[in-house]
Structures are given as structure tokens and as C-alpha cells.
Image (tube, rainbow, N blue to C red):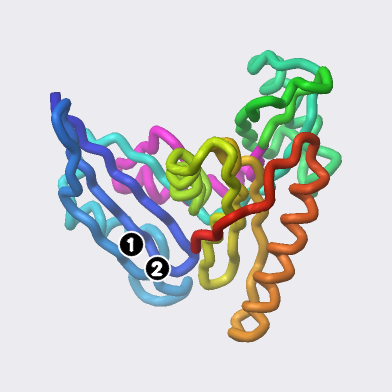
Amino acid sequence: MSRKVLGLDIRSDSLCAVLVKGSLRESRIAAALTVPIEAAGEESSGLPAALKAVAAAMDLQNADCVVAVPASLFSCRNVFVPFGNSKKIRMVLPYELEPHLPYPADEMLVDFTILDGSEDRGETEVLTVAVERKRLAPILAALAAVKIEPERVTLSGFAAAAWIGRNLEPDQTALCLDIGETSGALFVVAGARVRLIRTFPLPAEPAARGRAVRSHIRLTMGALNELPGAPKPPEAIFM
């Protein structure tokens, strides 16, 4: 049985779309397109116009959709909870995160992954991401306007980091650096999965951008070393 999957990567200045057609025997890229997202205020500007261009160029009928949105919209944290049940974790996480975030629990969407080897101290380590509902709402509305209902919404750069993790040796650690026009994201991959995520703003001036990236790498490495059971130092960086 054939299947179509549409991957969308929404950035601050562009929209990348890839349509994959798959069967039991093979998967292949049927179409790929990058569309600029014009600045607000210009004629035919913004994400809605870019999505219309993708919908006009590709056959999206019956396609499952996965969407990546700018990682800068999310707050990412590693937290520890005294149980490992996924249902309990989902119930308490918004209130665990609320003291560290500038918005109330009922205004955010939260998701998480339980990290391997996280119950050694009687606690479960959880990698969490949280986003304000109102920041995600206009993106979902623009997708709905072209009849796209995503099966999954994730952070830009996360899929690449997860793929890299699956292709590392079990004891290897790597940094995956995703750089955009106005922000960046750093994913620490260890034990074949994403262990830590940090997002940060970036200045426009090239030299200042380089200094900011180096600074955030150092801060991320410091945070990684403070985690229980910290992995080996990274042996590679992917950009």
C-alpha cells in the first residue's frame, strides 16, 4: 500500500517542503521546494502565502504531514520526577515547568521523552519541551487554511539530530548545531538519542554570531556535565 508523507520545515525567513512517496518496497522523494517567507506588511507576504505556493506545486491529497517550527518558540529543559509512569509525568509536567517559565501552565503545550538510564537515583530524567499555545496557534491556522492538519509538530533541527543519533555508536556523543537567520539550536546526542536541547537568539553581525555560537556551546557543555550520568565528551559536531 502506497503512502505519502509531507515534511514541512518552517523557518523565520523560509519554508522548506519535501513530499515522500513510499510503499512496502521503497520510499522516494517525489517533490521538494523552498519558498521564501516575505516580511510582514508586504503584498502576499508571510507564511500563508508560502504554504499556498507549496500546496499549488505539490499533490498533497491524502498526505500525512509532519511540521517542524522554529526551535526558538520552545523552552527546553531536563527535569527529574520521582516516578516513571508516562501518564503521571504528563499530568505533573506543566506544573513542574511553570516556576521556570514566564507563562501559566494552562497557556502552554508540553511534550516530553523519557531518557534511558534515568532511574538510577530513584528518579526519572525527562527531556521536556514547552510552547505557548498562542505562539503556535497562527502557524496551525495557516496550515489549516490550505487543508494541512499535521500528524506531528516538532522543533526545527530535532529530526536531523535524532537521525544522526541513530547512526552513532552507542557510547558516542555528538553536537548537532542548527543555525537560522535569527536564532540557533544545539542538540546533544548521546546513547543514540537526543539528551539535551538548548535554543538561543543570534545577532546579525557575522563576528558577533560566531562569538554567540561559541558561548552557547560552552554553556551547553557545562549544563551537560552537571547532569547525573553525564555522557562522554562529544567527538564530533554536525552543522
Q: Secondary structure at mark 1?
A: helix
Residue at which label 1 appears:
50
Residue at (64% x, 85% y) in the render:
207
In the rendered image, residue 22, in percent from the top left (x then y), is placed at: 18, 35
- Relative horizontal placement of residue 152, taking residue 55 as reference (left or right): right
- Asked which quadrant contains residue 201, the reply is bottom right
Report if residue 194 is visible in the image: yes
Residue at (30% x, 54% y) in the render:
17
Q: Secondary structure at mark 2?
A: loop
Which mark, by number, is residue 37? 2
Q: Report how far apart the C-alphas of labels 2 and 1 lie in the structure.
A: 6 Å
- Asked which quadrant contains residue 114, the reply is top right
Of 87 and 40, the residue lying toward us: 87
Which mark, by number, is residue 103? none
Q: Which residues are magenta?
A: 128-153
Of 191 and 34, the residue lying toward us: 191
Name the residue type under label 1.
Ala
